[in-house]
Image (tube, rainbow, N blue to C red):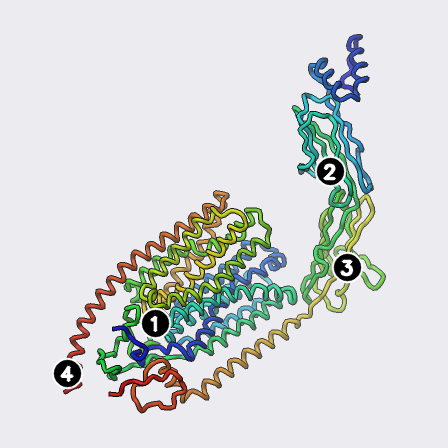
Amino acid sequence: MSPAPASILRDTPPDGGWGWAVVFGAFISIGFSYAFPKALTVFFKDIQLIFGASYSQIAWISSIMLAAMYAGGPISSILVNRYGSRPVVIAGGVMCGIGMVTASFGNTITHLYICVGVVGGFGLSFNLQPSVTIIGKYFQVKRPLANGLAMAGSPVFLCTLAPINQFLFNQFGWRGSFFILGALLLNCCVAGSLMRPICPKPTGGQLTQTNGTPKRPTTDRSEAQVNGHNTQLEKGCLENFNKFLDLSLFKHRGFLIYIVGNAVMFFGFFAPVVFLAPYALSHGFDEYSSAFLLSIMGFVDMFARPLTGLMANTKWIRPRIQYFFSFAIIYNGLCHLLCPLASGYGGLAAYSVFFGIAFGMVCALLFETLMDLVGPQRFSSAVGLATIIECCPVLLGPPIGGALVDTFGDYKYLYLMCGAVMVFAGLFLFVMNIYNYRMLERERRQEEGQGDESEAEETKLSHA
Amino acid sequence: MSGQNRNGGAEGERIKKRKALATDAAKCCKISDMFVSKGPDPLIEAEPMEVYNQTSAVLSCKLTDPPSTVKGHYWMRNGKVIESSKHNLPTLYTEHTLAKIDSHSGGLYECVFLSEPEVKTTIEVKTAPLVSAYKRSEHGNEKDKGVLVCVSYGYPLPTDWKWYKLEGEDKTAITNGTDRYEIKSTPNRTTLTIDNLDIAMDIGDYICDGTSEFGSTSNKVHLRVRSRLAALWPFLGIVAEVIILVSIIFIYEKTRKPDEINDDDDSGSAPLKSNANTDHKNKDVRQRNSN
């Protein structure tokens, strides 16, 4: 039975109303989380001179920040499970602010490593996980669109933070800038305050009757959504919040497929972004043109994410969203494989456009597919575990790429490697999801069979 | 002019012949080829030997007694080949014109003749060095370090660097190691570092002066010192904005909470009981068949 709007149950998410304010809050949080470590690089040249350190020592600041952001995943999952999204995001905003403000008084690199890297990184992880989690609680039907819109925060913030950082640096120097950025990061608290807690109510015995059709009992199962996946509703809010980290996820077939596929994918995901400008420089283009390629990519990315969300929301794609995700990854890989063929600035610009689209597509679907596989209830634990496992390939990818470039002296091999890795990951996910969909279909039919029996009993009882 | 001195009548005749034909490049070579088995050392006449304080010049090189046939010639500046000067003619005379001599065209010029082995000689083109501030205006934070940098281009590079602080019309010399100043200089770059910047004393113009055999050229750098508290005002402003927004959001939530809490969960879904929550603010109330 295809659920018409009138048949959406009470205990499913609102899909609108305050939800859009939550999307905006998530937009801000996600924007800061992903864009801030990258935008910090504007200050590195000057800090390098002042502290007399080498470039790689300074680059560690960004790396530690990213590592802390990913490694803090399970911790923020536990906290979200316990306290809900709002307090965690507000705490995260305060942590980031304190981290940056104390960093502005630092005199050694280690001071920066700790204040910006560790404290700031954990603060950002307390922003990232809860934001994606709460979208799953507020949206069901329009969830891919909401996810796409929220993830668009990353390129938008990157494009705005980079010039802001440059301006702050010219006006106030690096210390003043860090001081002011600490205040800017407190805006994450504003985002957090928008994330009003929402609690899926237990339906306990109330049968919904719409259009006169009797439905099966809903105590522990929500109505099958458009995509045909059943999500398990825990009974009551308190039970949700009292759980710590749901480690039983490691027995969840969909989750395992997801992390294996994604872990492989992330090896080749970020390296092309990092090396785009140096690649252009090696072709003989000047610094500004090379940097402009990144701007093209970021600009296209900005629009690609909400559009992908919109596409993923359509009734043709939503049921097969995992295939769409695999397609996006394979498309990404193909872009990289074809990149060495690009010649001249026009070719590289075209590559940037296609890469921007591909990058945006994958990012927009990244958390949506995980939500789709494990359901909103277990999502907060799932995302924490997923990010800490993805931490390794995310951090190792660019250095391995750099090593490839150094050994062969040619960027071609880097792109071939990244392309191959991503095509492989995409194909793996595609094949495994065919298997997963089939198994889920089989399980659903089994449950339906059992459900019909108990339904018949219930109606007998109600008529009695 | 010619190479080795050889004694003997026949030899003496040859030497005379060689001298007579020395200016004729083509004949000179043929004769050399004919008579000299192990030739005299090739000699290049450079004209002028050194360019000093001229606005333009024509550099020329003339090769006598090349060790083999010359396949071509070209010019180099500071070790880099000048592409437009490459010629593949077997002439023994080459010219290079410098229409305007400034700090960018000065340097060590070499004319190279492509023979086996190559022969070349150097002509120095000297100009007054160009001294420019790396950044016209520098910023520093109070009590922090301030760094002023001047760079120079040209040939020869300054051998001696001096820094002055401009106060009105007078300039006071800054000595390395005194007060809070430190000067580090290399021929093409000089750095003045001021420790523990003071807003009252250190704001102003500084002059870097580079001295070479031409005399000295100087340039000006302006130093601005920011107060420690400069960043405080934007900081407080943003914190205030955050507090205000958060308060608004929480207050909005509290005032609407009694009515909102049911609306929130029901927006988009059908109401269960037909008589419950009739004051929906939501437009999405859907009517259902009542049973």
* Residue A422 pos. (x, y %): 39, 53
Q: Which residue is mark 1?
A: A376
Disc number lying in front (3 or 4): 4
Q: Which residue is mark 3?
A: B206
Label 2 and label 4: CA atoms lie apart by 106 Å
Q: Chain of mark 3?
A: B
Pointers 3 and 1 within a single chain: no
Pointers 1 and 2 within a single chain: no
- Which three-letter amino acid code belongs to the residue tagged 4? Lys
Q: Which residue is mark 2?
A: B108
Q: Which residue is mark 4?
A: A460
Pointers 2 and 4 within a single chain: no
Tell me the SS state at disc 1. helix
Relative to B247, is A380 above or below? above
Disc number lying in front (3 or 2): 2
* Residue B66 pos. (x, y %): 71, 22
